[in-house]
Amino acid sequence: MGAAAIVALLIGWLPFPASASTLATRPAAADCVPSVGPGIPPPANIPSGLPGFHAAWYGQSGYPTLCPGGRSTATVAYYNSGTRGWTSGKIGEVAYLGTWEPDPGQDRASPLGGDGTQGSPATGWPRYNRVALQPAAWVGPNQVAWFQFAVIAPQVPGTYRLSIRPLIEGAQWMEDYGVFWYVTVAGTAPVGALAPLPAKWPSRALEIGMTDGANGAAALRATAPFAFRYQYLAGGVNTGKGWSTWDADAQFPVLYIKESASNRITPVLTYYMVRHSAPGNAMEESAGDLANLANASTMAGVFADLKLFFQRAGTQSATTVVLHVEPDLWGFMQHQNGDDPAATLVQVAATGMGDLVGLPDNASGFARAIVKLRDTYAPNVLLAYQLSLWGTTVDPVVQDPTDPQIDALAARSASFFNSLHASFDLSFAEFADRDAARSRAEGSGVYDPWWYPDDFARNVRYLARFSTLTQKRIVMWQIPLGNTKMRAENNSWNHYQDNKVEWLFDDPGRANLSAYARAGVIAFLFGRGGDGSTCACDAAGDGVTNPAPINGNARDSLSADDDGGYFRERAAAYYAASPMPLP
């Protein structure tokens, strides 16, 4: 059949009208009506006769809206635009559709379908990372293959994405790698349900990242396929030292985003500008933050600075960017003024910015202003709220509360967030801002900063409760890098011990990681919170060190990194064993 006849046939068959066989197979709830949108017709022109194996997208069925647990059959057509045919059953010549980036990632499992392995649901795919096999025994040059596959709706309402790309198994990936499906799951999440992933979240696996400055992405990616890197935006909005002065024309975030994207890493930028702004920068942190929030001139500068960031980040619309907004600030608000955000004065509409007219001058107005600026200037940016565990004035870990007390504390934290009435995409949380051994050396001894199994269990319970009550997934951030394995970690400056890395990534059965993933955690970002704590770098400038062992840390250093190279080793081993699919 000639190409013109195939086009006519395809156009006649589109737009893939919905039928009983393509929609949910289980009874729908009264408030859920499944449907399939119109199909997407082929392009006007397609390549042909390219030497070797090649494919060109040729149309697809529409995006479905399903009830939780409902199924749909998707169809995509690919035109063989090469000079070699595709032969079923022959490795090196057989064509498949494979999972691709950004969701769920190349060769990753998807919650929308699979073969029941690697955490994927059993929907009849050839494998968890192979969506469909070529439908005919032979697909020759200038012929069209109609791939079909089943998708299933997760139980939690939301929007899910499945990206695919054709490949010749055992030989090569082929072209047209921007093909995807959006699957909308209708309804309201049941009480206690796991929160959905943000619509633009770049992975369906539990990922690792770490702090990384400008021009470091390639070196970072060379040690392990890290999915994230993060960098502070700091310096204050009225000091002449803020991030907008770091590069000409305030290009620092643009360059950081571009560099990250070119190395297949999602950039995370921690916006920490209120603390460093005048006049509050001359005060103790909590008082200084609250004073700046109440200062109309300072806040006008903050909102102008945020708008500038979003304008710059918005120029990189093809790249998902995470903006982590003002760590500690939300905790200070709750700690000082209680669980009602309206009790904290923040100059918002009073700053006179046109974008913010009508917003209240309180913490809720502040949060909603950030969302409004993002929505206006940078829809590619995901906004992350900072969950400060101590905002309630009771630490749910080190103060050893009971399970009912933990649940009550998490409910208060969730109530504060929900009362902001701001559509942040996810929440960040943290274990501690420094290594436990350093906290022991500097602390009062009232609380033991070292984490034991019961402490991790309390942390998981608290996070899970917060996540379900807010319906936001969580990223653990600025995780201490100390360990108890390497001789380099002798509890001296830059070489303090901790156990977070080994708890999470030296657990062969991955039980500890699984507990956090079931609690709603989707990524772990490592980095020290200040000078003196352990770094996965040679911050001490002392090269490879192997002092006398203490506390059983008998392993020789693998590199000049101050942690003895342990974190990078564990990260590489995690990815080599395949990242864990998210529930």
Image (cartoon, helix red, strand yellow):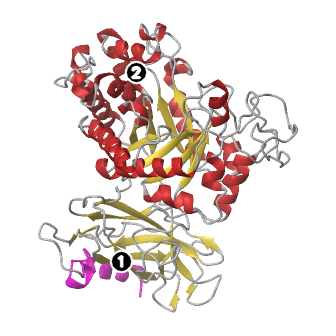
Instruction: From the image, tell me which residue sits under label 1.
Output: 75
Instruction: From the image, tell me which residue sits under label 2.
Output: 305
498 horizontally vs 141: left or right: right
Question: Callout 2, which amino acid?
Answer: Asp
What is the crowding at mark 2: few (fewer than 14 residues within 10 Å), some, or many (at least 20)? Answer: some
Q: Quadrant of the C terminus?
A: bottom left
Res 277 seen here:
yes
Query: Quarter of the image holding residue 31?
Result: bottom left
Q: 292 or 455: which is nearer to us?
A: 455
Q: 10 or 282: which is nearer to us?
A: 282
Residue 23 magenta-highlighted: yes
What is the crowding at mark 1: few (fewer than 14 residues within 10 Å), some, or many (at least 20)? Answer: some
Residues marked 2 and 1 touching at CB (< 8 Å): no
Q: 468 or 355: which is nearer to us?
A: 468
Residue visible at 36% across and 53% down in the picture: 199
Where is 237 relative to 95, above or below? above
Residue visible at 79% across and 36% down in the picture: 490
Asked which secondary structure carries label 2, the reply is helix
Residue at the extreme left: 30
238 horizontally vs 88: left or right: left
Q: CA distance from mark 2 to mark 1?
A: 46 Å
Q: Quadrant of the N terminus?
A: bottom left
Q: 572 or 136: which is nearer to us?
A: 572
Residue 355 place in picture, x, y as percent: 24, 25
Asked which secondary structure carries label 1, the reply is strand
| Sequence-first disc among 2 and 1 | 1
- Specify start and end residues of the magenta stretch as a single range: 1-25
Question: Callout 1, which amino acid?
Answer: Thr
227 horizontally vs 410: left or right: right
Res 319 seen here:
no
Residue visible at 47% across and 53% down in the picture: 522
